Image: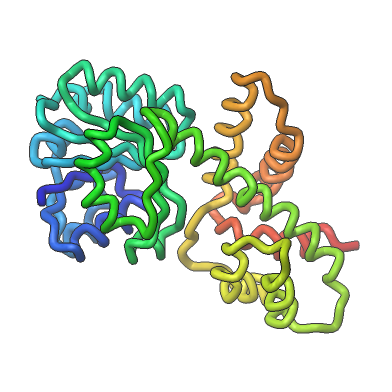
Amino acid sequence: MKIGLIGTGRMGGAIVQRLLACGHEVTIWNRSMAKTEPLVELGAKTAPSPSAVVAASEITISILTDGAAIDSAYRGAGGVLEADLSGKLLIEMSTVRPSTSIALAKDVLAKGGGVIDCPVGGTVGPARDGKLFGLVGGSDEHVAKAKPILDQLCRRVEHVGPNGSGATLKLSVNLPLLVFWQSFSEALSISSKLDISPERLIDILSDTSGAPNMLKARAPAIVASLKGQVSPNAAFTLDNIRKDLRTMIEEAKSMGWDIPVTSATLKEFDKTSAAGMGEADGLEVPAWFIKTHSK
């Protein structure tokens, strides 16, 4: 199948690799075209604009940084909405506010295209291996059309409602995972004086009821971080975590909710980023916290 992908950052690039491995013809675009070069070497084709990606593809996936990036890629010069969308299906995978997904769906549907929001759980490794968790919002018709591709990208796909529903649930899924890095930092500070190795400490903590699946899955990288090793390829940077936390706080506020733990975590991460950790993997935050906060 001819698949397009708009946004070849860490996750987008990994998804392109998965699509190529599944035998698809993949056309890509990124604002910084230098990021597409390694993917071209693997067999992807480039297009000069998002609208050109859509023209070359039956299904187009977009996975972008935030609402502003979506607005530019869809509504800007050469954007998706300039293409003939008749018979086309768009899968929007960015982690954004539901209102962004709903507004986008309205514009795409008005142009005769189909669209679903499908933000995904998982990082670069699961993306390359087709082991993501897809949270889908859209009509039954459009979800059914997207399902064969989503099944190649995801270990599990859940259709949770109309357009915007996937975006809503993704914020709920990510919130405890992102707040975890701060709470885990504080937990490690309490046990930091114990005379046991990082390997044993993380093995014990990951086998308790308070540990998310992520802790066990990423245990080797966390241990390496506690030993002072820097991860060469961040799966999910602290600055991306901060972006998602801001999105959650904005969405909660629009619904009349105050989410104080999330807000406090964002303040801590803002300070951590300002200290030079913005591009570091989130799993490196605990080691940095212990190193800089011990007395």
Extreme residue in the right direction = 295
Figure check: 276 above or below 207: above
Q: Quadrant of residue 51?
A: top left
User: Percent from the top left, x then y, of residue 221?
Assistant: 57, 72
Q: Quadrant of the C terminus?
A: bottom right
Residue 48 place in picture, x, y as percent: 15, 38
Residue, far front: 140
Describe the colour scheme in one phrase.
rainbow
Q: Can residue 181 be seen in this snapshot? A: yes
Question: Is 191 or 90 nearer to us in this picture?
Answer: 90
* Side (left or right) of 176 relative to 104: right
Q: How many marks?
A: 0
For the point 38% across and 62% down, the residue is 131
Q: Nearer the viewer, residue 133 or 26?
A: 133
User: Residue 107, position in %: x, y?
Assistant: 27, 18
22 lies above or below 112: below
Q: Quadrant of residue 106?
A: top left
Q: Residue at x 74, y 77 (%)?
A: 201
Is residue 119 in view from this perspective?
no
Image point (35%, 56%), residue name: 154
Eyeballing the image, is 264 above or below 287?
Answer: above
Question: In the image, is 224 to the left or to the right of 145?
Answer: right
Residue 111 in the image: above or below residue 10: above
Tell me the quarter of the picture where residue 92 sits.
Answer: top left
The location of residue 214, given as percent across then percent down, is 57, 63
Position of 72 compared to 166: left or right?
left
Residue at 37% x, 50% y is 157
